[in-house]
Image (cartoon, helix red, strand yellow):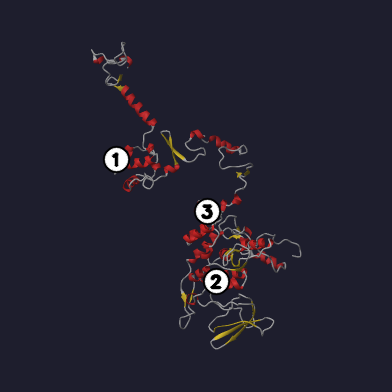
């Protein structure tokens, strides 16, 4: 304004109606706003052009899946739309209009040939710009568009039924532009896209979709429709390849096409030519640059075949393709923009290089973290690999990995279903559930016999996991020692200690009497140190 006061900073947000009133009060009649449609971002939309997150009333976070949110915001209220048909008075015919869900579905599919029995009459669009003249006749109207300067020069002329309803702002002598809607009805968006610019097409599409939802009592924000419409209007159709590698009739991203035209023009070649296009959601999904995403949606065999012939490369820039190959999706903190974010600990900035493969804390780590690390078990104290993961159990000097522990008895080891059901009844479904159990323990399960154990052993043996059912060496040694002690020391009636229950009869090869040697004359003398007790 003239006062030099900054009402809203460049790049700021218009947050309320009061902000708009403030601009009007200072005499501003036009301001330049950023919008989804005019966003120059090649992938997705930028934070500034999207604006506020409707769920938080704050600027949207970078990495928010606004496309998924938009689709869900449109689809979920769609369950509240009716499928009823409104009949006009008189004979049923072209005036029967189906409202609700079928109408929205055909809008997003961008139906070219409108079926009047389903959607009602197709709306008349002004084919050229000029002055509209309306001449009523007996059963129809004669519509003519004449030159605004010379009314005797007729640019276009056609007739419409007398039953049509004109738009509120259409009357005799009104100035119209190419693409303006003259009569009410279902808009042919393919024709509209050819007659007018992308902004007008977007505006008409958004208003048409929103009108259907509003008529059914459903409130839907324009932003969600604009996100979908942006993708539908993102491509152009090549009419003249020029010196480019494009094919005639090929659909190309309009931003990529603009870069191609600029590069070929600077190189002195013949730039390609294209006409604006609007694609339905099915066509958009099947013609995106990611062949993985296209193949997962529709015409799988055709997409894979054509992609293989053309040698297409999928750069994994969208969500579906990354999900298919098992990579981190480029959304939320999975975006590369967050890969170099500064780390903080309890509000303190961490300076220095970081690595997710580091085995110890770096020297610059906070002392509080180092104190915690000192209390953690060292590598030799636990079972696992050098990074502390992967191994969960050690037995007989061998380690069971987490992958092996997840193997299912039926699917992976080949154990019969009937035995698997019996094992499952007592909570044994995976190899990890066998830990700590012996064959004797398994044989105690109702319905499990030697045949089931044999199948289980064969499955474990095929994967070199048979040691799981074998007793631990330490346990075996302990059991042998226990038996030895029972042999050596056993209580007698007097509470003394005796050597075994039956000493060997003789110890040949020794002249001296040994502990435990037998006195053949008196077996009762086979007592050592009777006075020990």
Task: Relative to 220, say whether 500 is above or below.
Answer: above
| Pick the front one: 196 or 49 | 196
Q: Residues within 10 Å of mark 1 (few under 14, many from 20)?
A: few
**Viewport quadrant of the C terminus:** top left
Gap between marks 2 and 1 measured at Cα: 72 Å
Point out which mark residue 211 bears.
Answer: 2
Residue drawn at x 55%, y 85% is 140
* Place of residue 106 in the rendered image (x, y in percent of width and height, measured from the top left): 50, 70
Residue located beneath label 1 in the image: 450
Q: Residues within 10 Å of mark 2 (few under 14, many from 20)?
A: some
Residue drawn at x 50%, y 68% is 105
Position of 446 with respect to 407 (left or right) is: left
**Viewport quadrant of the N terminus:** bottom right
Position of 11 with respect to 225 (left or right) is: right
Point out which mark residue 322 bears.
Answer: 3
Is there a contact, CB below 8 Å, between mark 1 and mark 3? no
Residue drawn at x 76%, y 65% is 2
Residue farthest toward the top in the current orientation of the protein: 511
């Amino acid at each position: 304004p003239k006062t030099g006061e900054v009402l809203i900073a460049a790049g700021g947000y218009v947050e309320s109606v009061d902000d708009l009133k403030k601009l009007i009060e200072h005499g501003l009649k036009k301001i330049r706003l950023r919008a989804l449609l005019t966003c120059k971002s090649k992938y997705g939309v930028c934070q500034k052009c999207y604006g506020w997150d409707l769920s938080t009333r704050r600027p949207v976070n970078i990495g928010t899946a606004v496309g998924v949110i938009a689709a869900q915001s449109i689809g979920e209220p769609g369950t509240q739309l009716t499928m009823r048909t409104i009949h006009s008075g008189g004979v049923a015919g072209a005036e029967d209009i189906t409202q609700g869900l079928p109408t929205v579905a055909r809008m997003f599919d961008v139906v070219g040939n409108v079926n009047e029995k389903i959607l009602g009459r197709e709306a008349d669009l002004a084919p050229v710009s000029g002055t509209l003249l309306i001449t009523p006749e007996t059963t129809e109207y004669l519509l003519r568009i004449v030159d605004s300067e010379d009314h005797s020069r007729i640019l276009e002329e056609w007739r419409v039924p007398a039953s049509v309803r004109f738009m509120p702002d259409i009357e005799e002598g009104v100035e119209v532009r190419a693409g303006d809607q003259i009569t009410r009805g279902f808009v042919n968006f393919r024709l509209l896209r050819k007659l007018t610019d992308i902004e007008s097409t977007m505006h008409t599409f958004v208003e048409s979709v929103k009108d259907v939802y509003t008529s059914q009592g459903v409130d839907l924000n324009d932003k969600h429709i604009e996100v979908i419409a942006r993708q539908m209007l993102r491509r152009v159709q090549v009419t003249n390849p020029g010196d480019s590698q494009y094919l005639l009739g090929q659909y190309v991203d309009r931003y990529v096409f603009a870069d191609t035209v600029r590069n070929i023009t600077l190189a002195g070649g013949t730039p390609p030519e294209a006409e604006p296009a609007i694609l339905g959601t099915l066509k958009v999904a099947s013609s995106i640059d990611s062949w993985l995403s296209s193949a997962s949606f529709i015409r799988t065999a055709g997409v894979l075949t054509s992609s293989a012939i053309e040698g297409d490369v999928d750069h994994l820039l969208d969500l579906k393709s990354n999900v298919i190959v098992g990579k981190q999706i480029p959304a939320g903190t999975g975006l590369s923009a967050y890969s170099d974010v500064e780390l903080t600990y309890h509000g303190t900035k961490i300076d220095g290089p970081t690595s997710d493969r580091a085995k110890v804390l770096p020297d610059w780590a906070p002392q509080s973290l180092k104190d915690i690390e000192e209390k953690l078990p060292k590598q030799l104290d636990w079972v696992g690999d050098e990074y502390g993961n992967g191994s969960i159990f050690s037995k007989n000097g061998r380690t069971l990995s987490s992958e092996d522990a997840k193997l299912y008895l039926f699917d992976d080891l080949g154990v019969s279903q009937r035995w698997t059901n019996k094992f499952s009844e007592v909570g044994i479904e995976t190899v990890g559930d066998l830990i700590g159990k012996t064959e004797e323990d398994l044989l105690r399960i109702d319905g499990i016999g030697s045949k089931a154990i044999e199948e289980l052993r064969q499955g474990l043996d095929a994967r070199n996991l048979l040691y799981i059912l074998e007793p631990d060496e330490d346990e075996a040694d302990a059991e042998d020692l226990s038996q030895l002690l029972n042999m050596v020391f056993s209580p007698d009636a007097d509470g003394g200690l005796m050597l075994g229950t039956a000493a060997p009869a003789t110890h040949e090869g020794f002249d001296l009497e040994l502990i435990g040697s037998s006195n053949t004359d008196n077996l009762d003398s086979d007592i050592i140190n009777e006075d020990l007790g």
